[in-house]
Amino acid sequence: MKSRASCLNTAIIRENFKRFWPITAVATVFWFLSGPFMMMLPALSGVSGDIPHLSYTAYDVIFKHISAGSILLNLALPVALSVACFGYLHKSSSSNVMHAVPVTRTSLYLSNYLSGLVMSLIPMIINAPLVPLALLARANINMGAAALLQFMLEEFVIIFFVYALSVFAAMVSGNGVIHALTAIAFNFLAHVMYLLYSFHASMNYFGYSTGSSERDLVMMLSPYSYMLETEPFTAADLAGYSIFALLVSALGLAVYKIRRLERAGDSYVFNAARYIIGFLFCFIASSITAALFGNIGVFSYVIGFVIGYIFGQMIVNKTTKIFNAQSLKAGVVYALAIVLLVGAVKLDVFGYEKRVPQASSVKNARLYSWTVVNYSADAGDFSFKKPENIALLTAFHQEIVNNKDNFKSSESRYQSFGNERTEWVTIEYELGGRLHMGREYRVNAGFLRRSEALKALWECDESVAARNFVANFAPENCEIFLGTRPFASTYGDKDLWYEFIPSGADDVRAIRGLMEALQKDIDNFEFSDLFDDPSERIIDLSISIRASRADYEKAKAESDSPETFDNYNDYARMNSHYINISLDSRFESTIKYIRDLNLSEDWNKTLDLMFKN
Amino acid sequence: MIEVKGLNKKFDDFEALIDLNLNVQTGSIYGLVGVNGSGKTTLIRHLTGVLRQDSGSIKMDGEDIYDNENIKRRVGYIPDELYFFNSYNIYAMSRFYKNLYPGWSDERYSKMLADFSFKNTDRLAKLSKGMQKQAQFILTMSCMPDFLILDEPIDGLDPVVRKKVWRYVVDDVAERSMTVLVSSHNLREMEGICDSIGILSAGSMKLERELDELKSDIHKVQVAFHSREDAERAFASLNVLSREGSGSVEHLIVRGGRQEIENHVFAQDPIIFDILPLSLEEVFIYEMGGAKDEIKSILS
């Protein structure tokens, strides 16, 4: 009987639970086995409780490192239950019977919606409280009630979001197979479209990089993809996703009320869908073949288009007889749309290539280049913050854009680029909020050498300060690794390596000395020296800078879950920075220092062999 | 009472129902007859609130049926394509119906279960099509509906079961004034059951009459006169739909009241005069202007 207090029908809900409980039961067992059980397994078998690569949220522990199965379940279960609970829409017989029973459309929708959602959440609700126990048993981590609640809330939002989209897919699809496909497509369509855009952009745009906001925005579109990218969601994230899921659910109800039930069993319910599905098949297939067979030019698109057109039309029309006037007319429209889309990218209609941000709109900026900033010390975290330096970087960026035609041969990723050395240059701007912009260029080394803006950037105070190893890093937090490369000219053709570990005062002194020698060499370099042809005789030097105890204390104080910061060594290891330097004959002070350390006879003879002449 | 006025429904460019009118009196059985594709099932899906009309109105006891929970609680429906939940037996399915229909009678359910030789544990998916139809009939009739909509209900049932089914229906009409609309593509099945008949063709109602009225308005007459002149005088004053001669004896199909026909014929002093019974199929053939293919089809 219908509950008078709500629009829910308890009979429908009860039957759903009676019919579909096995799906939830299997998922609960799967969740348990792939989550808490998997985490506890080493502890149960008496293995050490350390979790490799431990990150400091339970969420990360479970979903990014332990249980890929649970990630799959967050998608598969809501989709499966939406297909089960709304499956009656997709057959003529069940649609007739279920819409003839004394339940309003609203009540039918809400009752099925709620039963599917609750059944999707049950595996998580049963298993989540076991996670703190598993963490305790496995790694002696006390998760705490707040962290558990946060974890459950995030799970709820992800499942709710995926389920809402899956139910909406049920409203616009005609049969069960198309419903399941549409549900998955709705959750990932934006991502797939971004991939296609990214493919076309990387083939056509000078300087295209995925390091811009578009990628982040696409990943943010769904909590399912965003969870793989981010720290625990903020309250605003959770609220935003929940509101969106509610709106999609309400839209689903509105669509249900105008849904044409006579279309049960068809591929689509609304006529517009046939054109959207048809177009997507053509666009995706032509993009894939363009990627696979790009070397045959426009025919690579044509092959995919024809394949996509045939399959798409067969699916939407549910027949193999697709070559009729209506289908062919639609095919012409799809072809024109694809030509327009690809043409817009090829001709850079949106001005992607010319876009260089105003220096005043940039909060901070990064420049990656093997030659020029390799010696900037803090492993990719270094950025220009001063307006005058940011202005230098945008000026350098503008120089690249203005010289686009000179880099054409070197930009191609599929052709050789002659005798001149080229180099990848990556520029990233933080524009405030979550907006950022990235570009990646392959340019001639000669261009870099001649760039006054780049020279000024190299010599600016922020760069100089970043290169100051001695001032920036305490030797007692640094490990230094020396190694020869395979097939290098070493004494006796041996692969040599040596590790400086700061375990005692003598070691720390040796590391300090090595860093001072290195600093002396780098300080002596002029900008133009950076572009000397590198020697083939190289020793790799890698400095691993562990986070200091002060950094650890600071991070712990600022964390929402300070209880997870109980181990400095783990934190320090997880937060190491690395600097890699290739020592060639120009590093005279450093090589002399290493030789003076008298590491071994092999090392001494190798250094003589490599650098004496 | 079921009242349909000016009902129109289009599926894309196809006009499934065109300005359709239909009236079913309370406590009567209405036979909806038409060839396959004439629109019977589409009309029934409107009557059960499954489909929404493009225009026109469908009322049951004065209330719109579409999305009307209250009136739907009083409607029992046996569709042409049956649907039961997977793996359910008839008892589990009966609990579902019991929870949805306030008029549900456990007593009726038990009686019918025994009457149709069913067991509570019978799994519906494993039953034959005919048995499934009986199961659906038990479930629907146990809801004790005020309105019963049956879409080709006796297809696949053997004669003994058909008889049982009709007995339950007729009893409920007599005892509870249940209103019944039953569709069929075979007119003969409707004879002896229905109070009224509607013939649907290409989405339009071609004819809608009470059976008694139909039969009292058309008569088959066997007659012979002393002379051809007497015969022509008598026939001139009658509405003759069909005339066949065999020697001096003529067989006529005449529209009009029995008394009126007798008066005209006796005025010419016939040698032989007899009014013969007409079958329902003959009535329809002559009402609809001859034995067209469509009429032949619903009579076959």
Image (cartoon, coloured by chain):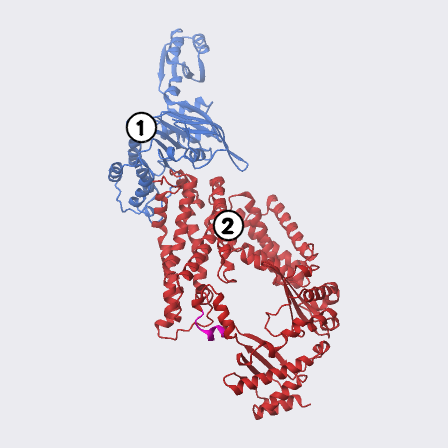
As displayed, is residue B33 above or below residue B286? below
In the image, is residue B242 above or below residue A47?
Answer: above
Magenta residues span A565-572
Horizontal and vertical percent position of residue A440:
65, 66
Q: What residue did someone put label 2 on?
A: A244
Q: How many discs mark residues in the rendered view?
A: 2
In the image, taking residue B241 as reference, residue A4 lies left or right, namely left
Please name which of the two marks, 2 or 1, marks the residue nearer to the observer: 2
Label 2 is found on which chain of the structure?
A
For residue B25, which quarter of the picture? Answer: top left
Residue at the image point whose x is 44% and y is 68% from the top: A564
User: B138 or A339, which lies in front?
Assistant: A339
Residue behind mark 1: B173
- Relative to A210, is A393 on the left or the right? right
User: In this rendering, does residue B178 appear at all?
Assistant: yes
Q: CA distance from mark 2 to mark 1?
A: 53 Å
